[in-house]
Image: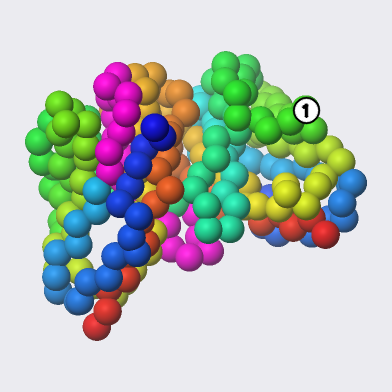
Protein backbone atom coordinates (compact mmCIF):
# COMPACT_ATOMS: atom_id res chain seq x y z
CA UNK A 1 0.00 0.00 0.00
CA UNK A 2 1.29 3.43 -0.90
CA UNK A 3 1.96 5.92 1.88
CA UNK A 4 -0.53 8.41 0.52
CA UNK A 5 -3.39 7.72 -1.85
CA UNK A 6 -5.61 10.29 -3.46
CA UNK A 7 -8.82 9.87 -5.41
CA UNK A 8 -7.54 9.50 -8.89
CA UNK A 9 -9.73 12.02 -10.66
CA UNK A 10 -9.77 13.96 -12.78
CA UNK A 11 -12.50 15.82 -10.97
CA UNK A 12 -14.69 18.24 -12.85
CA UNK A 13 -17.16 20.59 -11.15
CA UNK A 14 -19.15 23.61 -12.30
CA UNK A 15 -18.29 27.08 -11.10
CA UNK A 16 -19.84 27.77 -7.71
CA UNK A 17 -20.01 24.12 -6.68
CA UNK A 18 -18.16 22.42 -3.84
CA UNK A 19 -15.13 20.39 -4.87
CA UNK A 20 -14.18 17.54 -2.55
CA UNK A 21 -10.70 16.09 -2.65
CA UNK A 22 -9.82 13.05 -0.60
CA UNK A 23 -6.65 11.46 0.65
CA UNK A 24 -5.97 8.33 2.71
CA UNK A 25 -2.72 7.34 4.34
CA UNK A 26 -1.19 4.22 5.78
CA UNK A 27 1.11 5.36 8.60
CA UNK A 28 -0.75 6.06 11.85
CA UNK A 29 2.30 7.90 13.13
CA UNK A 30 1.73 10.73 10.67
CA UNK A 31 1.19 13.98 12.49
CA UNK A 32 1.02 16.85 10.03
CA UNK A 33 -0.92 16.95 6.80
CA UNK A 34 -0.62 19.41 3.97
CA UNK A 35 -2.55 20.35 0.87
CA UNK A 36 -0.60 21.86 -1.99
CA UNK A 37 -1.95 23.27 -5.23
CA UNK A 38 0.06 22.91 -8.41
CA UNK A 39 -0.84 24.75 -11.55
CA UNK A 40 0.34 23.25 -14.81
CA UNK A 41 4.02 23.98 -15.33
CA UNK A 42 4.41 25.53 -11.89
CA UNK A 43 5.74 24.34 -8.57
CA UNK A 44 3.52 23.31 -5.65
CA UNK A 45 2.21 26.05 -3.39
CA UNK A 46 0.84 25.47 0.08
CA UNK A 47 -2.88 25.88 0.61
CA UNK A 48 -3.34 24.55 4.11
CA UNK A 49 -1.88 22.36 6.80
CA UNK A 50 -3.75 20.53 9.52
CA UNK A 51 -2.64 18.38 12.43
CA UNK A 52 -5.64 18.11 14.75
CA UNK A 53 -8.71 16.00 14.16
CA UNK A 54 -11.63 17.97 12.87
CA UNK A 55 -12.06 20.81 10.46
CA UNK A 56 -9.85 23.77 9.69
CA UNK A 57 -11.23 26.58 7.57
CA UNK A 58 -9.39 29.23 5.61
CA UNK A 59 -11.55 31.29 3.32
CA UNK A 60 -13.16 29.02 0.75
CA UNK A 61 -10.99 26.09 1.78
CA UNK A 62 -11.72 23.59 4.55
CA UNK A 63 -9.38 20.80 5.47
CA UNK A 64 -10.77 17.84 7.40
CA UNK A 65 -8.69 15.32 9.30
CA UNK A 66 -9.81 12.02 10.77
CA UNK A 67 -6.84 10.18 12.23
CA UNK A 68 -8.89 7.18 13.35
CA UNK A 69 -9.99 6.56 9.79
CA UNK A 70 -6.68 7.78 8.36
CA UNK A 71 -8.07 10.22 5.89
CA UNK A 72 -7.74 13.88 5.17
CA UNK A 73 -9.85 15.86 2.78
CA UNK A 74 -10.00 19.30 1.23
CA UNK A 75 -13.25 21.03 0.41
CA UNK A 76 -13.31 24.01 -1.89
CA UNK A 77 -16.50 26.01 -1.64
CA UNK A 78 -17.76 28.30 -4.38
CA UNK A 79 -15.25 26.80 -6.80
CA UNK A 80 -13.79 29.15 -9.36
CA UNK A 81 -12.14 28.43 -12.72
CA UNK A 82 -8.93 29.73 -11.15
CA UNK A 83 -9.06 26.75 -8.77
CA UNK A 84 -8.40 24.44 -11.71
CA UNK A 85 -5.12 22.75 -10.83
CA UNK A 86 -3.68 19.55 -9.43
CA UNK A 87 -4.06 19.20 -5.68
CA UNK A 88 -1.40 17.29 -3.79
CA UNK A 89 -1.92 15.73 -0.40
CA UNK A 90 1.23 15.38 1.71
CA UNK A 91 2.11 14.23 5.20
CA UNK A 92 5.03 13.74 7.48
CA UNK A 93 5.66 10.59 9.49
CA UNK A 94 6.07 12.17 12.88
CA UNK A 95 9.29 14.02 12.16
CA UNK A 96 8.55 17.71 11.82
CA UNK A 97 11.49 18.45 9.57
CA UNK A 98 11.77 15.17 7.76
CA UNK A 99 10.67 14.55 4.22
CA UNK A 100 7.06 14.84 3.21
CA UNK A 101 5.25 11.99 1.53
CA UNK A 102 3.14 13.12 -1.39
CA UNK A 103 0.18 11.60 -3.10
CA UNK A 104 0.10 11.62 -6.88
CA UNK A 105 -2.42 14.41 -6.93
CA UNK A 106 -5.97 14.93 -8.09
CA UNK A 107 -6.55 17.10 -11.12
CA UNK A 108 -9.46 19.49 -10.64
CA UNK A 109 -11.21 21.36 -13.42
CA UNK A 110 -13.79 24.01 -12.62
CA UNK A 111 -15.81 24.90 -15.68
CA UNK A 112 -17.66 28.19 -16.06
CA UNK B 1 10.66 38.15 1.89
CA UNK B 2 12.40 36.27 -0.89
CA UNK B 3 11.28 32.73 -1.56
CA UNK B 4 13.25 29.69 -2.60
CA UNK B 5 15.21 30.28 -5.78
CA UNK B 6 16.62 27.74 -8.19
CA UNK B 7 18.94 27.94 -11.14
CA UNK B 8 19.01 27.37 -13.98
CA UNK B 9 15.29 27.43 -14.69
CA UNK B 10 15.83 25.22 -17.72
CA UNK B 11 18.69 22.96 -18.70
CA UNK B 12 19.13 20.97 -21.86
CA UNK B 13 22.06 18.59 -21.93
CA UNK B 14 23.34 15.67 -23.89
CA UNK B 15 23.31 12.15 -22.57
CA UNK B 16 26.49 11.42 -20.64
CA UNK B 17 27.18 15.00 -19.57
CA UNK B 18 27.24 16.15 -15.96
CA UNK B 19 24.84 18.82 -14.70
CA UNK B 20 24.67 20.93 -11.56
CA UNK B 21 21.44 22.34 -10.20
CA UNK B 22 21.43 25.04 -7.58
CA UNK B 23 18.98 25.87 -4.81
CA UNK B 24 18.99 28.93 -2.59
CA UNK B 25 16.54 28.41 0.31
CA UNK B 26 14.56 30.95 2.23
CA UNK B 27 16.89 32.81 4.57
CA UNK B 28 17.02 31.17 7.98
CA UNK B 29 15.48 27.88 6.88
CA UNK B 30 17.59 25.09 8.29
CA UNK B 31 16.01 22.25 6.36
CA UNK B 32 16.33 21.80 2.60
CA UNK B 33 14.82 19.15 0.37
CA UNK B 34 15.24 18.00 -3.19
CA UNK B 35 12.41 16.33 -5.08
CA UNK B 36 11.89 15.56 -8.71
CA UNK B 37 8.75 15.33 -10.75
CA UNK B 38 8.54 13.56 -14.06
CA UNK B 39 5.88 14.56 -16.57
CA UNK B 40 2.45 13.72 -15.19
CA UNK B 41 3.89 12.06 -12.12
CA UNK B 42 3.92 12.82 -8.43
CA UNK B 43 6.80 14.22 -6.42
CA UNK B 44 9.69 11.85 -5.85
CA UNK B 45 11.82 12.58 -2.79
CA UNK B 46 15.56 12.65 -3.37
CA UNK B 47 17.42 14.01 -0.34
CA UNK B 48 16.95 16.08 2.81
CA UNK B 49 19.47 18.37 4.49
CA UNK B 50 19.42 19.62 8.04
CA UNK B 51 22.08 22.28 8.13
CA UNK B 52 24.97 20.94 6.06
CA UNK B 53 24.35 17.28 6.81
CA UNK B 54 22.02 14.92 4.99
CA UNK B 55 20.19 12.68 7.46
CA UNK B 56 18.06 11.21 4.69
CA UNK B 57 19.43 10.55 1.23
CA UNK B 58 17.33 7.47 0.67
CA UNK B 59 15.67 8.84 -2.43
CA UNK B 60 18.75 9.33 -4.57
CA UNK B 61 18.10 6.92 -7.46
CA UNK B 62 21.71 5.96 -8.18
CA UNK B 63 25.29 6.85 -7.35
CA UNK B 64 25.26 9.23 -10.29
CA UNK B 65 23.28 11.58 -8.08
CA UNK B 66 24.90 13.56 -5.29
CA UNK B 67 24.14 16.71 -3.38
CA UNK B 68 25.85 19.00 -0.98
CA UNK B 69 24.96 22.01 1.08
CA UNK B 70 27.41 24.59 2.30
CA UNK B 71 27.12 27.26 4.98
CA UNK B 72 23.71 25.95 5.91
CA UNK B 73 22.37 27.71 2.88
CA UNK B 74 22.88 27.01 -0.82
CA UNK B 75 22.63 23.45 -2.07
CA UNK B 76 23.85 21.89 -5.28
CA UNK B 77 22.44 18.72 -6.80
CA UNK B 78 24.85 17.07 -9.23
CA UNK B 79 23.90 14.44 -11.75
CA UNK B 80 26.84 12.72 -13.41
CA UNK B 81 26.68 10.96 -16.77
CA UNK B 82 23.10 12.03 -17.34
CA UNK B 83 20.63 9.60 -18.86
CA UNK B 84 17.40 10.32 -20.69
CA UNK B 85 15.39 8.98 -17.75
CA UNK B 86 16.85 11.79 -15.65
CA UNK B 87 14.69 14.26 -17.58
CA UNK B 88 12.31 15.81 -15.08
CA UNK B 89 11.60 18.93 -13.08
CA UNK B 90 13.88 19.11 -10.07
CA UNK B 91 12.26 20.92 -7.20
CA UNK B 92 13.89 22.29 -4.10
CA UNK B 93 12.02 23.14 -0.93
CA UNK B 94 13.01 24.58 2.42
CA UNK B 95 11.51 24.57 5.87
CA UNK B 96 12.06 26.08 9.29
CA UNK B 97 11.34 25.13 12.87
CA UNK B 98 8.35 27.36 13.26
CA UNK B 99 4.70 27.14 14.18
CA UNK B 100 3.70 25.84 10.77
CA UNK B 101 4.67 22.27 11.58
CA UNK B 102 7.49 21.96 9.10
CA UNK B 103 5.68 23.36 6.11
CA UNK B 104 7.86 23.13 3.04
CA UNK B 105 8.06 25.99 0.57
CA UNK B 106 8.99 25.15 -2.97
CA UNK B 107 11.16 26.91 -5.48
CA UNK B 108 10.16 27.28 -9.14
CA UNK B 109 12.11 24.20 -10.19
CA UNK B 110 14.73 23.39 -12.79
CA UNK B 111 13.44 21.68 -15.92
CA UNK B 112 16.08 19.24 -17.08
CA UNK B 113 15.95 17.68 -20.51
CA UNK B 114 18.52 15.06 -21.44
CA UNK B 115 18.76 14.46 -25.16
Q: Position of residue A10 (x, y in %)?
A: 34, 64
Span shown in magenta: A23-43
B90 vs A32: above or below: below
Residue A56 in percent (x, y) is at 13, 42
**Looking at the picture, how far across and down is residue B8, in whole percent?**
71, 53
- For residue B4, say whether it is visible: no
Which quadrant does the C terminus of chain A fall into? bottom left
Against A13, is B77 above or below? above
Residue B92 position in % (x across, y down)? 57, 41
- Name the side, left or right, on which B42 lies relative to B36: left
Give the residue displayed 43% in from the left and 63% down from the top.
A39
Is disc 1 surrounded by few (<14), some (14 to 19) or many (20+) residues within 10 Å? few
Please state which of residues A84 and A58 is positioned toward the viewer in this rendering: A84
* Residue position marked by numbered label 1 in the rendering: B63
Residue A64 visible here: yes
Quarter assignment of residue A82: bottom left
* Side of B108 relative to A14 (left or right): right
Is B105 inside the magenta-drawn segment? Answer: no
Q: Say if A34 sits above or below B85 in the image.
A: above
Q: Residue at x 53, y 58 (%)?
A: B40
For the point 59% across and 37% down, the residue is: B34
**What is the chain identity of the residue bearing mark 1?**
B
Secondary structure found at label 1 = loop
Q: Residue furthest bottom?
A: A112
Residue visible at 45% across and 23% down?
Answer: A98
Quadrant of image for the N terminus of chain A: top left
Q: Nearer the viewer, residue B86 or B54?
A: B86
Amino acid sequence: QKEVEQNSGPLSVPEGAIASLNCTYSDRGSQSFFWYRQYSGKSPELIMFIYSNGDKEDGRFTAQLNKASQYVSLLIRDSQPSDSATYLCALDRGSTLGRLYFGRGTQLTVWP
Amino acid sequence: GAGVSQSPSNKVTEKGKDVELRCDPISGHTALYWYRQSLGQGLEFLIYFQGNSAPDKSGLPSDRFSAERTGGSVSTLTIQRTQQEDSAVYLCASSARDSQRGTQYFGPGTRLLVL
